[in-house]
Image: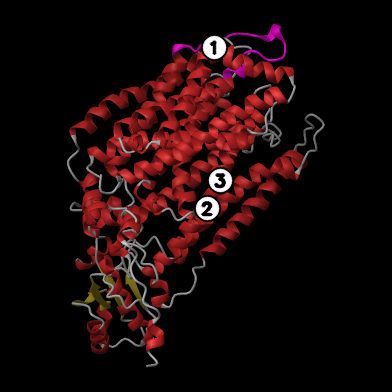
Amino acid sequence: MASKSHEGVAVAPPPLELEREPLVHNRRSLGWLSDRISGIVEGKTPLWWWVSFAICLPVAVLCPLMIGYLIVTGVGVWGLNHPVAWGWAIVNFVWWIGIGHAGTLISAILFLLRQKWRTSINRAAEAMTIFAVMCAGIFPAIHVGRIWFAWWLFPLPNSMGPLWPQFRSPLLWDVFAVSTYFTVSLLFWYMGLIPDLATIRDRAKGVVRKFCYGLFALGWTGSNRHWSNYEKAYLILAGLSTPLVLSVHSIVSFDFAVSQLPGWHTTIFPPYFVAGAIFSGFGMVLTLLIPLRTLFKLEDVITVRHIELMCKVTLATGSIVGYAYFMEVFIAWYGGNPYEAYAFQNRALGPFWWAYWIMISCNVICPQLFWFKKIRTNMVYVFVLSIFVNIGMWFERFVIVVTSLHRDFMPANWGDYTPTYVDVLTYVGTIGFFMTLFLLFIRFLPLVAISEVKGVTPAADPHHPAGGSRGEGH
Amino acid sequence: MNGEDLHYGILAEFDTPAATMAAAEKVRDQGYSRWDVHSPFPVHGMDEAMGLKNSQVGWFAFLGGAIGFFGGNLMIWYMNSFDYGLVVGGKPLYSAFSSFPVCYEMTILFAAFGSLFGMLILNRLPRLHHPLLKNRRFAQVTHDKFYVVIECDDPRYDQDDTHALLREAGSRHVELVRD
């Protein structure tokens, strides 16, 4: 009779309609997951991969070509001039770094919020983050004018005194924010890869393959003593990346907000930039993953529910961005500053009105369509809308940078801005560079976190019948 | 007893996390100390089943973070105030406020290094040659199988008793692993 008290109260299983949709469809086994996901890396390279690679690589080459031309000739090859001294380069920098934010949001913030669905998409999103931050980092470095002095950005000893960087400048804060962001994202991504590299090592047929993957797997044996430290380190990295991801775009926004320029000098910038970054990042994750899940037949892992949930995040952040646009305009009027009021009137009705209205339609109106389940579950619609999100967010940065600069306090200082072909091709080149790196990633590394997805299936739960439990509990 | 030197330990294979956990509890209750459970993913509750204490990675991260924050402040004070002070716009040479964004980023950077390297140090990784990695059967550990491994070095290790214990715990495959 004494043992009876240990058994506890019997709880009936929840009714079927309350059961959550499983994260992996068709009751796929643990073995199926490693076979399918590692199979992408091990199998024959598909034809579409070669075709995409053949397109992306020459486009990527444009980037070093244009940068070489810029260095050899000088910044005059860009459309920059007085008064618009920050043109496409800064627009592209902010756009790329914003895209990067979704990866860290998915890997860190959703981890802390125990959103288990993140496991199917976090690896690809983190890879996207790293490549996007690499593209972003190119622009400020080539924007300094005398590129051979770009190392002055870093606190390195030199023969000029030594003359140190100016730590009171938000531009220098940005150097630290972006380089920290890149490094921490890379560490987080690599740590997540260790168990999966071990999976590929253990499946490898050839010696070279076994050696290469084995080297980077660091001798991982899946030991529970190791897992215990690993999970703690993962939790701490997630806890560190959460304030990091919020700080990086806040600091990027300081580049603008700390200045005195109407249209830039607003306190709403940090949260508004962070929301916009996550919005654009989810747009890019959707653009990349919707074709990939079909091409690699991963519909059971990256399910329609995953896409739907990402659409909902896009809707939420898109609505925050819409609110921020409204509030900026409201404060410009309510604040009573004539320069501020003019800056916003000029944005909507001035010579760059088209950029402002592209931004409004792509960022405010488009995501509102995600209220409808029919649209969220239709992959074609979601894909098209995700492209609009990417376009809209590029125009947002264009509006902020160019329209604020081209007409400031004194009409004598007003001017126009047109990019040159070098501006355009450098930007196109970074898109090629990004896509080339992403194609290499999906070919050589597992694009879904195998061990993490295994961990959220019922077969991994020791208290679930699929995990071998006979219902005694612990 | 001389033959034992050739062996690393004894390995028992399990098919499900629940069976592995039940076996781990048995091994723990027998008082073994040099043993481990290997699984393709972290099994929730296995730390308790093995009797493991809370991981110490946090101390490494904390140390890294503290070095980052105070090191960052020290660097900025040294560069902008002590070594080569330049007055810009009448602002103080060193201020905790304008230094904060950079120190904040450095805190995160060094704490992140602390947690990754702390994890590797505590796990004695990288270790590219391990007796278990030479075992053909053990390659399934990253696929869908679970293993309980008891090392020969364990003071309670006895080839026959340990073998029997793992059999009793429900493993259908128990084998000796060569060193």
Quarter-of-image position of residue A325: top right
Res A82 quadrant in image: top right
Mark 3 neighbour density, 10 Å: few (under 14) some (14–19) many (20 or more): many
Which residue in the rendered view is the most extreme toward the bottom? A1
Q: Chain of mark 1?
A: A
Return the chain for callout 2: B
Element under disc 3: helix
Name the residue tied to disc 1: A76
Query: Which sits in the foreground, A141 or A170?
Result: A170
User: Which is in the foreground here, disc 2 or disc 1?
Assistant: 2
Residue most extreme to the right = B90
Name the residue carrying label 2.
Answer: B112
Q: Are marks 1 and 3 on the same chain?
A: yes
Which label lies toward us, 2 or 3?
Answer: 3
Which quadrant of the rendered structure holds the C terminus of chain A? bottom left
Q: Quote the CA–CA distance across marks 2 and 3.
A: 11 Å
Q: Position of residue A78 (x, y in %)?
A: 51, 14
Which of the labelled discs sits on residue B169, or is there none? none
**CA distance for labels 1 and 3:** 36 Å
Q: Please determine whether, in this image, residue A466 is positioned above or below residue A392.
A: below
